[in-house]
Amino acid sequence: MTVAYVAGVGMTRFYKPGQHQPYRVMVKEAVEAALQDAGIPYGAVQQAFGAYIYGDSTCGQNALYSVGMTGIPIINVNNNCSSGSTALFLARQAVASGAAECVLAFGFEEMQPGALASHWEDRESPFDPMLGRLKEIAPHTPAGPLALQMFGAAGRAYMERYSAPASLFAEVAVKTRAHALNNPRSLFNKPLTVEEVLSSPTIYDGYMTRLMACPPTCGAAAAIICSDAFAKRHGIRKPVCIAGQSMTTDTADSWDNPIDLIGAQMTKLAANQALNEAGVDLADVDVVELHDCFTPNEVITYEGLGLCEAGEAERFVRAGDHTYGGRFVVNPSGGLMSKGHPIGATGLAQCAELVWHLRGDAGARQVAGARVALQHNLGLGGAAVVTLYQA
């Protein structure tokens, strides 16, 4: 199998809905930044995978035609919130299989204000079985938008199982916002206190507040994936190796409890597979970008990835093992909570952040001496993608 490398990355700043450019314009900015970063022309790209969930079929072609029209295969990817990493997974697979030497993965989203909603009310929703199962295993779950029900029930289950306080989720929000202060691309750049998080408007089940949830966001991101031979021929600056990667979906027992229902089991399986392929120990990881659509999910993902043992997230956070000076630096970008979550772009923005750290190009938020990075991107419905990078 051919080893795949990240040759170049690019992304736009993320914006609130209504403050953004059309997706075609944002994609052009992100892709051209990735090409410039790699130092190659668009004509060197042999395949492309475009990720988004809110848009008509072939939006990927329309977006990429603004960069060039070279006749290459352009594949549109829709895999809920894991769409960006799914495009990355497919690009890496194309290179690793030898089908292509240089592949583009890009993602974008134009989102609307408010909670995520379905645009297909005339047919069965893929989430109907999950919501039905949630009513069986957590019958007292309050009504609300899909994501709030799912992640809210998981947070409630975590608190009840481990006697954890809601302030734990607030502490994670404070940490994440502190990281975002050093990211010029972050949507939010004002520090928070635990009290501010807890006193912000309650949005679900009496404990989850607005500052524990990521905002709808618009933006684009891109990555160029290539073979070692291609990197050498083209003089790629500091290529970053994709040392291990796994994409998992739900198993028959994933829906036994609210925590696994939102992807904890998928995450654990994907992490183990990616670490095994990379041949590295979790203790070797320096920096992590994980899917923190809600701060309860960040807490649950600490344990799903194995950053701490089950039920130990509160101790992990209180010890500062999720930030600079601790065992891992988690979401130095500010994460989805502060940087924003334009769904199709999210996984590729995570990739860009980690590549910058492994190159030593992350500026004021640089994780000193970073050599190994882990990325986690999750989508309900479901899919989890974990990727290990090595400098």
Image: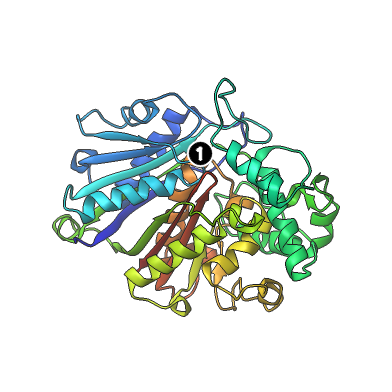
- The structure residue drawn at horizontal position 50% and vertical position 54%, both measured from the top left corner, is 252
- The structure residue drawn at horizontal position 46% and vertical position 63%, both measured from the top left corner, is 269
Q: Residues within 10 Å of mark 1 (few under 14, many from 20)?
A: many
Residue placed under numbered mark 1 in the picture: 219
**Horizontal side, residue 17 vs residue 4: left or right:** right
Observer able to see residue 215: no
Question: Residue 272, position in %: x, y?
Answer: 43, 69
- The structure residue drawn at horizontal position 48% and vertical position 75%, both measured from the top left corner, is 368
337 lies above or below 56: below
To which quarter of the image does residue 147 belong?
Answer: top right
Between 335 and 232, the residue placed more toward the observer is 335
50 lies above or below 329: above
Q: Is mark 1 on a helix, strand or loop?
A: strand
- The structure residue drawn at horizontal position 19% and vertical position 61%, both measured from the top left corner, is 1
Residue type (three-letter) at the residue carrying disc 1: Gly
Observer able to see residue 252: yes
Quadrant occupied by the C terminus? bottom left
